[in-house]
Amino acid sequence: MVFEGTELKLDPTCAVFITMNPGYAGRSELPDNLKALFRSVAMMVPDYALISEIELYSYGFLSAKPLAVKIVATYRLCSEQLSSQCHYDYGMRAVKSVLRAAGALKLRYPEEQEDILVLRSIKDVNLAKFLNQDVPLFQGITSDLFPGIELPPPDYVIFNLAVEDTCVKHNLQCTDFFLEKVQQLYEMIVVRHGLMLVGLPFGAKTSAYRVLADALGLIEVRGGMDEHRAIYTIMNPKSITMGQLYGQFDPVSHEWSDGVLAVSYRAFAMSTTLDRKWLIFDGPVDAIWIENMNTVLDDNKKLCLMSGEIIQLANTTNLIFEPMDLEVASPATVSRCGMIYLEPSTLGWEPILCSWINKFPPLLNDFDKATVKAMFLRFGKPLLWFIRKGGVKEIASTLDSNLMVSAMNMFDCFMDDFYDPEAVKQLSDLDVRAQLEGVVFFSCIWSLGATLDFNSRPKFSILFRALQERIFPQHLINDWEIPFEIPPVDKPYVLTIPPAETVFDYRFIKEAKGKWILWNNDLSTAPAIPRDIPVNQIIVTTTETIRSIALMTLLVEHNKAMMIVGPTGTGKSVYIIEFLLKKISKNYTPMFINFSAQTSANMTQNIIMSKLDKRRKGVFGPPVGKRCVIFVDDVSMPLKETYGAQPPIELLRQWFDHHMWYDLKEIIPMKLIDIQFMCAMGPPSGGNTVTPRFARHFNHVCIDEFNDSIMVTIFTKIMSWHLETKGFPKDFDPCVEEIVSATLDVYKLSRKNLLPTPAKSHYLFNLRDFSRVIQGVLLSSPSITEDLLAMKRLWVHEVLRVYYDRLVDDSDRVWIFKMLHDVCKSRLKENLDLMFERLASPGNPYVSFLAKYIQVSVVLRRLAKTS
């Protein structure tokens, strides 16, 4: 037989068997001509109860038959009564896990009541994976099947003490939920060699295994349990290619090169120490790469590489997967792994708040810390409820914990003075309290409220002002149906936000007790537009510009990651580039990357690494003394793979979580230091999204589409600048307001009437189209624009060029021509027919760039009249 160009001699005593699960994700059906060469054998569902009974007898259970029936009944009832989740599995492998756990318990406690051993096994194996709402149902099922059986509390005294000490060391809060999950993780590691930590961000997945690893090391030192420290290697399987993960042959030399997994797996397999070894796969689990791990995850425990090498998994090694969900994992994968589900809603954001307050500057006393904590608790719960249930719209939706962490990050940006003893000495206790209150107000507004759209902000402002009052107004609780009481504060707040405008219109200045000033106060000192600047580089200073650059300065210069979200044409990239090139401190060096649909993870890594220096072995960063700010534009653009992963984003997330990448040639980890990221993206509603595990690392600031007054202000200034710098006579001044207002009408009417459909998917109009019309008018000069009418004719041409040229059918062309007639009459005070009358005169040699449009338009008008 010839295989891959090589002739192979077949052994007649050798047989080929194929096992397959039709219909699974990542599996393909065999072609019929191949299937015909094999004899098909259909497998039936086995008798779970009989298998369980035999296994229990083999472990030494005397009442194996009724216990086997109870085990099978438990899974049957769970599948019928509990919610349907991708990580739930009630098949034969799940039953086998319970049987193995029961056998291990029987060996350790041979005199214990058998019902207790089996019930303990069922709970140990299954309880960790259930969602909150399913736990009571599961408890009800087990209590019905094992009536009157009460489990003795497990002996975790030594273990719990080590976990609590480790949490103190890492400044983590050892809550009951977190301690329970660490215990479940330890129990799962003991009984399963493959397991998954599943859950949304801020569920403490990463913290759980880090704390467990350190706690096991502490137990090894202290003694009391036969345990050893844990060492682990982390990789993100989606931030590299399949060949770089497992290994690949060079297409030219046919030499084999190991992948990241192969190197780490072999090192752990060859290790002879008793230390626990964990291979951690921190990334999405999908059928593209996980199916190759099936032989490792089942009882064979062997990794089979394409080179022909087969590596046996060491008994001290575990494979730990850390995905957000298992939406695209096959049942074959789910059934092979133990599951631990961690819900961020169960953990809550209060433990994060406590750990953050522990890191406050030492010059702040306990009263100050208590004040800040009380304010976050008072403002956090109502504002989060309002964002989720208050009938408002978020431009970019994030998790509750993410919003609260963003508020804490913003608060940190104001703490510089509190590290300076001289600055603190000059402040009275009242000044400190007033400043802390003002900073909490500002932080909550520009974190919890920063993702809301323009129309939702006034309602947010009403609630925020109500929370500033000593007693929350009862009528708001009744009118908005707030489902909880908001307790009064002990003392009135020292300096509340002035009531003249919304809370979003004020900024907080830390001077003495602090003060609130309007953002638009800075407009009076804004520089004029330079005379020699190109049109496409003009930035007209508005309140939004001042606000965005001020927030960027705060966050970036305090090393906080920032994500700007907003529709196309709102100036996200322009603001950031202006800030990074002209406004930021000299200690920062910018780097610019544009993502597209074709951007790959390797391409992204190569671009960033090419701009960094090697500091020492395995450590890279910008030049010493500098900090690199990497701006990634259109970060949500990379094309999603078959199962939804975006490798470039997974690569960036790997740095955020672990501050390292892999050298793809040497297959060694590289640490990246003194870098930080800024990103910009369109609203997720546009279809391009990023994984919540990536978005969780950012402070989100959303820029909504400009309202009419802002657009008129911006383009009026640009038009006036053009007329002045080009030397137009004063006679042209009236056309500025007319043309800008007319352009605004055309823009709004086009968005309302020319809607995208499958046949007209390019009917997408944004602020860039508004800008293109004005930029076309700015090509005029006094030498060729003889009068106001010529300027207006030029405007009509630009509208036709930007909007009319995009249209695909006659009805739309008729509509835009009628609309232009109406707008010219109402805004320009001109009749469109009379404006271009000379073009319609027979024999007129006048040649204009508008002629073809007008000729088509005349025909269309006739068609419209006849129809």
Image: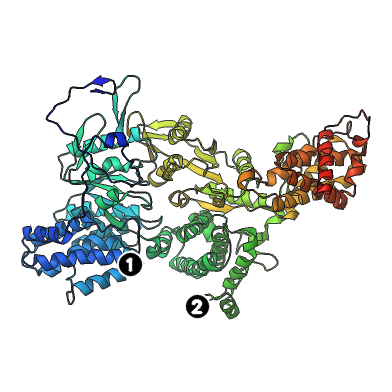
Q: Looking at the image, is 159 positioned above or below residue 579? A: below
Q: CA distance from mark 1 to mark 2?
A: 28 Å
The residue depicted at 18 percent of the width and 73 percent of the height is 146
Q: Is residue 409 left or right of residue 526?
A: left
Q: Amino acid at mark 2?
A: Glu
Q: Amino acid at mark 1?
A: Asp
Q: Is residue 733 among what the camera can see?
A: no
Residue 638 image label: none
| 70, 589: nearer the viewer | 70
Tell me which corner region of the image, top left, top right, bottom left or bottom right, holds residue 128: bottom left
Q: Looking at the image, is 86 positioned above or below residue 4? A: below
| 628, 537: nearer the viewer | 537
N-term mark: 1 or 2: 1
Question: At which x and y percent is residue 783?
Answer: 89, 31
Q: Which residue is mark 1?
A: 134
The residue depicted at 5 percent of the width and 61 percent of the height is 60
Q: Which residue is mark 2?
A: 485
Q: Is residue 327 left or right of residue 789?
A: left
Q: Is residue 286 among what the camera can see?
A: yes
The quarter in which the N terminus is drawn is top left
Tell me which corner region of the image, top left, top right, bottom left or bottom right, holds residue 859: top right
Viewer-side label of 1, 2: 1
**SS of the residue under disc 2:** loop
The residue depicted at 5 percent of the width and 67 percent of the height is 111
Q: Is residue 342 left or right of residue 375?
A: left
Question: At which x and y percent is residue 218?
Answer: 22, 54
Q: Is residue 244 left or right of residue 605?
A: left
Question: At which x and y percent is residue 695?
Answer: 48, 50
